[in-house]
Every structure is written in C-alpha cells, then in structure tokens.
Amino acid sequence: MAQKGFLDSIKKQFGDGNYAGDEFGGASGHDGSGLPADNPGNFLFATGIECSYPTIQNGKVRRDLLRECGHYDRWKEDLGLVKELGLNVLRYGLPYYSIHKGPGKFDWSFADEAMAEIKRLKITPILDLMHFGVPDWVGDFQNPDLPVHFAEYAGAVADRYPWVRYYTPVNEIYVTARLSGKEGAWNEQLKTDKGFVTALKHCVAASIMGNHEIAKRRNDCIIVQSESAEYTHELCATPSPSVALENELRFLSLDLLYANPPSATVAMYMMDNGLTRDEYNWFMTGKPPGYQIMGNDYYGRNERIKLPDGSIQISMDVLGWYEITKDYYERYHMPVMHTETNVFEADLAPIWLMKQWVSILRMRRDGVPVLGFTWYSLIDQIDWDTQLKEVNNNVNACGLYDLNRKPRPVAETYKALLKEFGQITIVPHAEMLEITDRPARLKVAT
C-alpha cells in the first residue's frame, strides 16, 4: 500500500488546487492582462504627439510640427484617439516658443483648451516644456540667459496647471545641442565644438532650474528626462579617437544633469570649449529635485556604423534598446522608461513594436525597474527623414494613425499588446510600492 503523502492530506482538506485566497496574488491571481488601469502602480503605456519647433534657414523658417501635422485644428480628435487606443498616458508638448511672449508675458489660449480636454479625458500628461526650440525673443541656445527665461516659463506652467505631476523639462538635450551647435542644422546653426558645449550646458542648466521651479510648486513632481540612446560602431582595425569621444559625449547631458563626473577626456573637452570650473562644480552639486526617471529614446537609426572609408551607415538595431539602455542604467542606476521609438516604414512598424516590447520584458526580468513605454508618435510626422532641415513636406509613416487620423497596422498591434500586458505593474507586487503622493525628500542613494 502506497504511503500517504502530504498532498493526499492537503487535497482531502482543501481540494485539488484553486485554493481559497489564491486570487490574491497566488497561482490563480491576475496575470496582468487587460487594458491599462488608472492607478499609480500600473506600468505606464504611452504615446506622444510630435511637437518639435526648431528654426532653420538662419531663423527665417520655424518648423512647428503641431501645425504641420494638423494638431492645432484637430487637437480634440487627437486626444480622443489616445483614449480610443486604451491609453491613459500621453507625452505632450506645449509650444514654448509661441506661449512665452516675453518676460512675464504668456499666451495660454491654445494650451488652456488642450489641457482642459486632457484633464476631462483623465489622461495623464507627461508635459514636455522645451522641444528643440526657443521663442524668437530668446534667440537660440547660445543665450546664457536661457536658463532664467525658461525657469520663469516652467514655473508659470506649473502654476497654471497644478494638477500636472509628470514633466519633461527639456527634451533630448544631447540632440538639441548637437544639431543646433555642432551639425549646423537648427536654430543657431553652428558647426563648432564650442557651440555644442555652450548649447548643451545652457539646456542642462535650463532643465535643472525649470525642475526647481516645478518642485517649488509641486513637491511630488515626477521628472521623466527623455534623452536619445545612441551608439556608433566602428569597423576599423585602429579605432579613431573621434568616434571614441563621440561615444562618450552621448552621456554628457545626463552626466551634467545627474551630477555624474564624466571621464577626464570629456572634462578636458568641455573645458577646452567653454565650460568653466565654477560651472562644472555647479553641475556636480547633486541631482535635481523631485522623483527622477531616466527616459531613453531609441530608434534603429540611433545606431550607426562607420566604415573604413569614413562613410556612415545606419545600422538599425545592432545592439538594440536593451543593450544600449543597459549601458545608461549601469552608469546612473535610475528608474528607466522607454520614452520614444518608431520606424518610418508602416509595414515594418508592428514587428518593430514587438521587438521593443521583448527588450523591455527582458530588461524587467533582469531586475531593472522599467516604468513605461512610449510609441512616438500618435500621428504621422513630416520631414524627420531629413531631421527637419529641409521643407519637403514628406510624410513619415511612423504614427499609430496617419495624417487623416486613420489607424495604421501598428495601432492594432499596440492594442493587442495592451490587452495582453496592460495591467502589469512596474515591478512585481508594485501595489505595495505605488507611486507616493508624498513630497520628494531623500537624496538618491549611491
């Protein structure tokens, strides 16, 4: 006769599985499927509305993608599409260049209407305050008064919309400085290392001071710093110092923002190009206030391969978001969000979305706190294939919807992903650790 085991005793007393209480996080608990829930512990599934507004042609032309993509005329429809997708989070940029009319002067006419609708729809905005451009009266990113002017604007926004908690003060600081000060594409259109360093230090200082003004008014603010995650591969037997420096400079905006001392090579480069010792010490004082999230923007075109003849090829996903973002995480040890991605080919977008999501799942499985994901953008964009440098009116089919507001195939893929994973939490049992409404207080542990 077989010896009685513990399972025989359990089954006799409690039955064969599906035990009472199992629904509360046990074997028959919720698996995280279903459209995103509107609670603070939910993973942040988001989209964004493209809002770039740099100037080109020596300041003669303002590229305003909110206008060029029809958002000023169809903003209510666009915000409705966010909810139609099942999303509760939106990266949204107000047009700084047209709102801030001068010191102490603001035009809130468009912003008030759009923000009222966002609030009515119960969308959580991650409010983007500076996106590749500044008001005409400020000039450009070489202006040392930019941090003071921008801080006034950030404080005014926080005063006007006190219900907003999530902010990106300055979008993609590294890209802003590189294309404006080093590559001659936008705004000041300089092609110098000094122009790059000057633009970058002014943008980082603006982000820090804007962050301080927000925190004074909203001491539980959550700052999602959206920065481009980049890498250049070099297929040369003898790697060049210029590419090695480029791969270090990609961290520079976050190094200054998060008070992380850069390498000696980068420090000398900065000081050779206008950063003073006092400015450096100011940046190294400490991280900005509030709860900080490191957002990484990853497009396949962020990875490049330099060939032996010096030419550059777009490599599309050699390392991918996982490997590149891991470099950033291991450098800063900050909570992570995938804040932008897309491809320009509509037929490739569904598989690209799935690849990004696989990377996120792997990152989470490896213990990195990934808080959210963003398909950028809601609507197709214009002329980003030439980085807005040329007015070609070329439609980039990278949106969840086209410019007629008709869904592209990736919209259905995103909906399916939301139904499968929409109620996962930031980390397992994050219900215990839901984002608090208490003021931020402690310094980040080292």
Image (tube, grey):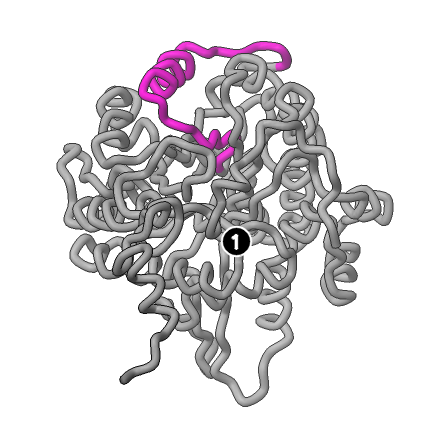
Q: In which quarter of the image is residue 50?
A: top left
Q: How crowded is mark 1: few (under 14 residues within 10 Å), some or many (20 or more)?
A: some
Residue 62 visible in the snapshot: no
Residue 377 occupies quadrant: top left
Secondary structure category for the residue under label 1: loop
In the displayed orientation, state which residue is furthest to the front. 1
Choose between 339 and 28: the one closer to the eye. 28
Q: Which residue corresponds to mark 1? A: 369
* Residue 122 on the magenta span: yes
Q: In this view, does 221 lie to the left or right of 28?
A: right
Residue 266 appears in the rendering: yes
Would you say residue 201 sits in the magenta stretch? no
Q: In this view, does 228 lie to the left or right of 286?
A: left
Q: Is residue 232 left or right of residue 343?
A: right
- Residues rendered magenta in the picture: 103-131
Residue at (51% x, 31% y) in the render: 166
Q: Nearer the viewer, residue 180 or 278?
A: 278
Could you tell me residue 213's position as x and y percent? 67, 24
x and y percentages locating residue 46 in the rendered image: 36, 40
Q: Which amino acid does label 1 sit on?
A: Pro
